[in-house]
Image (spheres, rainbow, N blue to C red):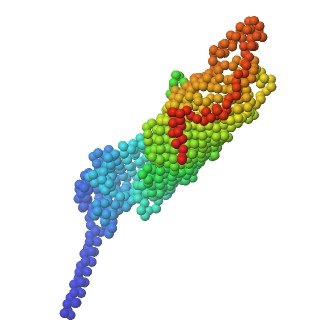
Amino acid sequence: MQNDKPRGRKWAVRIVTALVALFAVLVLVVMFFPWDVLRGPVNRYVSEKTGRTFEITRHLDVDLGWRSATVKLDGIEFANPSWARDPYLVRADRAELDLRLWPLLGGKVVIPRLMMVAPAVGLQMEKDGRRTWALGKDTSDEGTVPTIGQIQVDNGSVDFLAPHLGVDLHAEVAYDSSKGELPLSYRIKGTYQRQPLTAQGRTGNVMQLAATGQPPFPLEIDARAGQTRLKAAGTVAALSSLDGIDATFDLRGQSLGDLYGLLGIALPQTSPYALSGQLGKRASLWEVKGLKGKLGLSDIGGEMQFDQGTKVPMLSGTLRSQVMDMDDLGPLIGLPPTARSANAVEGVAPPPTVTQVKRPQRNGQDKVLPTATLDFERLGAMNADVRYSADRIRNVREVPLDKGSVHVKLQDKVLTLDPLDLGVAAGKLSGAIRIDAAKNPADIRASLDLRGMQLARLFPKLETTGNSVGKFGGRINLSGSGNSVASWLGGASGDVAVLSGSGQFGNLLPVFATLVGGDIIKFLLRGDRNVELRCAAVAFDVNKGLMTGRTLVVDTTNAVFIASGQANLANETLDFVVRPEPKSKNILSIRTPLVVSGTFGDPKGGVEVAPLAGRGLAALALGAINPLLALAATIETGPGEDADCKGVLADANRPTAGAAANGAARAKGAKQR
């Protein structure tokens, strides 16, 4: 029994020794194994598994470890599937890759590092999900796509084709160690989103497709797609997901609306722009901080976020202009930019201007209301919550805007501008606009209130002559359907009204409006004097684009003006008769109704011929008897009476029941409750 223990120990020692020797032999075999003899079997195995030709053309070597192996390929050719344009997925003089061993047991290929010398890579993907870099026979199977961490390239080219996305790019890559931290340069040429694209730049020597455990790598890019140009410099943690971006950028182009085709962000059409700032991306959230630049002649600044992680991407932020130029608003409603706006941004080719674009005509006259179709379809690409304000508004020409702000919301294809506030003529225009793009044509509602505006500010000629004018207000409540400003107004229904109480203004306006010769003589002899405005009301019922005057009255101390008629928003025609009724007796009067006709683009004014001709014939007849008697035919007996201002304003405040009232009620529903 005593001898059994020494014998057991001897056998244990022998077994351990044998195992150590076997391990040493295995290590020696692995270290000195002629891996190249497996080149043929490996070529056949990979070709069989992938269904396409794979060949290591010159030499194979492997450094085997416990968890991974480093595979060295001297000459490699890997064919693409038969449906691909390029015959090869990759051809390279040399390649070296780190291959994780344990994931292979589960059928997954994990390559933490891939180095290639002088590669030519042909990548292609199809709408049905097929891609050339899927390594299984079913190239639409996500599970057959290898996971690659880093790619290091020493000169070479890459082609990428995705016909359904309008992408066809060719990139040339070169390595130059003298370039410091950015030794890898690239040039790209082709088409992106069916627009010509060119790009160039530099990166670090290692491109990180996955960021696990790796520092961000530097990247510079100067790209141009169509009329859009981007310059950026910074770092990127992971190219495969474009994650961990931290870069400065300069972006410019003809219209922010062009970014929809390039980036999928539904921004409005604008004048040419130039924007810069700090761009960051973490997971699905893009952020722009310190945004500043120009939109045409207006400055712009603020911060923006674009979250792609929600079911529908979300754009949010706050923007502000110190000075906003009115010329830059034309593209928002379908008008081309003015020449001033089109040429405002350096380095951007000016788009066609409003004077260069041939506009639709009717009876030889230009249309005034914008007829360009607004692309409401893209509103379904995202949701939005953006606030914008302008400290000062300039170049307002006839409309004296002071400042403005708007809260823009887009939710499930419904766009609202609420509240919308503008300082106008020392007063305020406020309200809401709602566009439901889920319907075709879009359902559009506008409810706007005008408060405390001054005629002297609205008409600068009155202000410069020292006339003092009372304040006025009004409202616009219109609803209808359309895909352009013109088509919407041409079919809209609702209520439009402008109202004013008492005030004062120079008598020049009523004098010439009534054509009262005696008052003209007194004005010339005595100079201007103030006339009291008792009240004024201009109100329309709107029924499917036809604006019918409900109350058209201006009452002053020396005359009452009562008008009737219609304005057709569909065909842009005017048909009004203004009847002046002087309140005093005068001579030399040729008072007769005034006629306003023509189109919005070419309005025409005149007088009704019959009353004027009657007075003229009477003057001629009496003049034949005695020249002094001819004045009798021009005597104005002053039949005009004060208007019932309370009743006038009350009537103007009530749209007629029916289409006008219903349209106004629908428009008011655009405002937040």
Residue 79 appears at what percent x and percent y?
29, 50
Q: Residue at 38% across / 49% down in the picture?
A: 158
Q: Work out whether 51 lies above or below 354.
A: below
Residue 97, image quadrant: bottom left
Is 624 positioned to the left or the right of 172 in the image?
right
* Residue 593 visible: yes
Q: Residue at 31% across / 63% down in the picture?
A: 103
Image quarter hosting the N terminus: bottom left
Residue 629, image quadrant: top right
Towards the viewer: 185 or 287 = 287
Is 85 positioned to the left or the right of 308 in the image?
left
Towards the viewer: 518 or 87 = 518
Q: Residue furthest right?
A: 526
Towards the viewer: 86 or 510 = 510
Q: Residue at 64% across / 21% down in the picture?
A: 594
Q: Residue furthest bottom?
A: 2
Is 333 positioned to the left or the right of 97 in the image?
right
Residue 400 appears at what percent x and percent y?
65, 37
Residue 673 appears at what percent x and percent y?
54, 47
Q: Residue furthest top?
A: 625
* Residue 369 visible: no
Residue 113 appears at what percent x and percent y?
38, 60
Q: Residue at 28% across / 71% down in the picture?
A: 27
Q: Work out whether 481 lies above or below 68.
A: above
Q: How many marks?
A: 0
